[in-house]
Amino acid sequence: MNKENRIISVRDMEVKFQVRGNFLTAIRNVDLDIYDQEILAIVGESGSGKSVITKTFTGMLEANGWVSNGSIVYRPNKETIEDENAYFKEPIDIVNLQSPLISKDVIKSVVKINNEKIKEILKEIKELYKLNPKYNGSLEQQELKIIRLENKIESEQNETILAGLKQELQDLKEELKSSLLDENKKIAIKKINSNKHTILLEELKKELATLQESMTFTGNNRVANKIIKLEVKIKATEEIIKLINEDSLREEKVNDKLTMILRLELDINKVKPLDMKSRRNVSKITSLIENFIETEVSFTDEEKEFIINYFTSKKYLNRFENELQQICLSIIENNTFDKDHFYNILVDWKRIKNSDLVNKVNALKEIRQLRGKTISTIFQDPMTSLNPLLPVGFQITEVLRKQVGLNKSEAKAEAIELLRKVGIPNPEKRFKDIPGRYSGGMRQRVVIAIALACRPKVLICDEPTTALDVTIQAQILDLIKELQKEYKFSVVFITHDLGVVAKIADRVAVMYAGQIIEVGTAKDIFENSKHPYTWALLSSLPQLGKKGDDLFSIEGTPPSLFNEIIGDAFAPRNKYALELDYIKQPPMFKVSETHFAKTWLLDPRSPKVERPAILNNLRKRIEEAEKVG
């Protein structure tokens, strides 16, 4: 695919929701390109994240959700740039556009919940050091700084900043070394703790033996429950004794907990807007760069010190600050930089540089220009998409008058023409009818007319045929394809019905547990799919069923998105899973220029696994089955 034709590029996107005092990661590290005038289908089971992805394109996530990482860049095509009525004529990052709209309640909750978790983890670390001591006093915060610095050093490429970070790291390590506990004292504390827990372990084992001897066949579960609880206590005590005696185990557990704290701090940083002091400092830095562009005079030593101190003093930099840092360092070291890049991030900066209230008001104005005019959506159920009390014509003209700026008579004429294009008979007469006088299929046609009223560049179809019968489904699919050719927009089609995908899609992205696990052309997916989950989805098509046989179904359930997922999320349901699938997440392997899949089966070292024979000649069999139907 030609990169120049990309209209939307999603990179490393992560979406979270706050649910009952916990955080659910609905989308994880998604990369996706949508090309101009293509039909991209996103498929997967319910809850896989299909709708969530497209809601981020128009800032329509529920109030408890937010994009916690990544970017969604909309690139206007040549026709849009030349269109006088188009609002967005330069590439924009939709995430930055909608970041001021993150609910204050969500921000407060993220900060509060994560800070409480950090306190709990720090307590756990102190308990570990009580059992197996290392330092004189509590130095968990210094250890945390060391890991933070090590992470910065690993990702930092600039020599000037790298030298400062390395010196700071060395100083911190020297400080911790000087605070190490005397070896004799350390051995004495460990001996006391080991003896204490060894005695406890012996007592627990004796109590367990007594209970096991008293077991009878009376059916009383109290003794059995006590035995289970004692066995758990014994196992925990054995782990504690092992931790007391093995410094390496203590180090491993402490490092794991410190890493968890860093992750929680990073989540706080991602959701919190810049404070006013940071905004003033960033404004000063952008002014210094603009002055450099005008005068071509290098920064003074004082200005260089101010810039470097700002970036190195912060625990974490957001994406905008990272990009600004690179520009500043390029000027300091080489007296040159990418001006186009600076002007691009300056556009993002203007969206977040004012007070939270001003930023929110401005963001709401821009998001209105994005919805409908740039990216439009056809929702799943036409019964709830329309206001049942207002005439259909009014609901279309309202969009045309507010978004396009037409007067009343112009809007009416355009609305009637739209109704005619979507196949509503006698549109002049049906213009004043309320939705209750339309059938389900006709209502969906009206929803399509509303979605297309502002001539969007991207049309999102969120399972638009689910609530309709099979005959009407086919009509709606044909209508979308016809209108796409006429208006030349891109379509993102969300569905779990692969039979629909076979009819309409140019490319297909398969989602599972918040990740895109395979993407390719429709031909790639139907004829040469590589991921076992895609095989399972295709095998469950009803068109492949035989009379008298049970339809294929995927065993098990998707993982909980509240928990961290280790390895391949599909591994527990995958009969082809390798041992590695339970340990490490697979990368996205390249199958061809258009086809990519996220499975360890594509690694050259993996055993060869053939695609299920039932999937041979799949697309042809679907078409034949539907002709018979």
Image: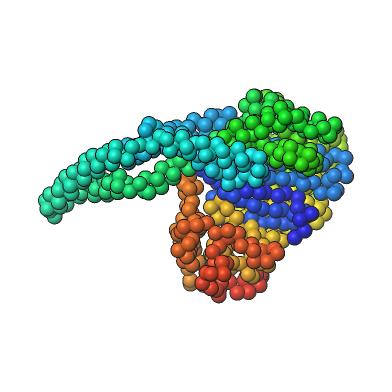
- Does the rendering let one see residue 16? no
What residue lies at 57% left-to-right and 53% top-to-bottom? 515
Q: Position of residue 406 (x, y in %)?
A: 85, 35
Residue at the spot x=54%, y=43% of the render?
Answer: 150
Question: Would you say 320 lies left or right of 19 here?
Answer: right
Q: Nearer the viewer, residue 467 or 301?
A: 301
- The residue closer to the viewer here, 486 or 25, is 25
Would residue 168 be seen by someone viewing this image from the given angle? yes
Give 349 or 289, whichever is nearer the viewer: 289
Residue 268 quadrant: top right
**Residue 208: image location, x then y, percent:** 17, 49
Q: Work out whether 264 lies above or below 503.
A: above
- Residues 590 and 539: in front is 590
Q: How many marks?
A: 0
Q: How is the image coloured?
A: rainbow
* The N terminus sits in image quarter: bottom right
Q: Is residue 155 left or right of residue 292?
A: left
Q: Is residue 485 above or below residue 15?
A: below
Q: Is residue 191 left or right of residue 375?
A: left
The quadrant holding residue 126 is: top left
Percent from the top left, x then y, of residue 404? Answer: 82, 37
Classify residue 208 as left or right of residue 269: left
The percent position of residue 85, horizontal first and vertical second, equals 85, 39
